[in-house]
Amino acid sequence: MTTPSLNSFDARRTLTVGSRELTYFSLRAPQLEALGVARLPYAIRVLLENL
């Protein structure tokens, strides 16, 4: 079952592993990089990607 989620920053990406397709939100999306997300501590960025 998939939960619908917003893609406000156009950061949604898909990753195919074997026959499985996974969806994640990349913090490297240009709109998020403009907000300075890259300057956050690594641990915080990992948490943000997994929300």
Image: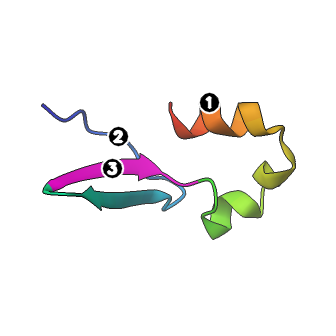
Read off the residue under disc 1.
Answer: 47
The disc labelled 1 sits on which kind of residue? Leu
Q: Are marks 1 and 3 in contact (CB under 8 Å)?
A: no
Q: Camera-side residue: 31 or 45?
A: 45
Q: Earlier in the sequence, mark 2 or mark 1?
A: 2
- The residue positioned farthest toward the front in the image shown: 18
Read off the residue under disc 2.
Answer: 5
Q: Camera-side residue: 18 or 43?
A: 18
Q: Earlier in the sequence, mark 1 or mark 3?
A: 3
Q: Residue 30 in the image: x percent, y percent?
A: 65, 69
Q: Cα distance, mark 1 to mark 3?
A: 15 Å
Q: Cα distance, mark 2 to mark 1?
A: 17 Å
Disc number lying in front (2 or 1): 1
Disc number lying in front (2 or 3): 3
Direction from residue 25 to residue 34 in the image, left or right: right
Q: Residue at x 77, y 64 (%)?
A: 34
Q: Residue at x 79, y 53 (%)?
A: 38
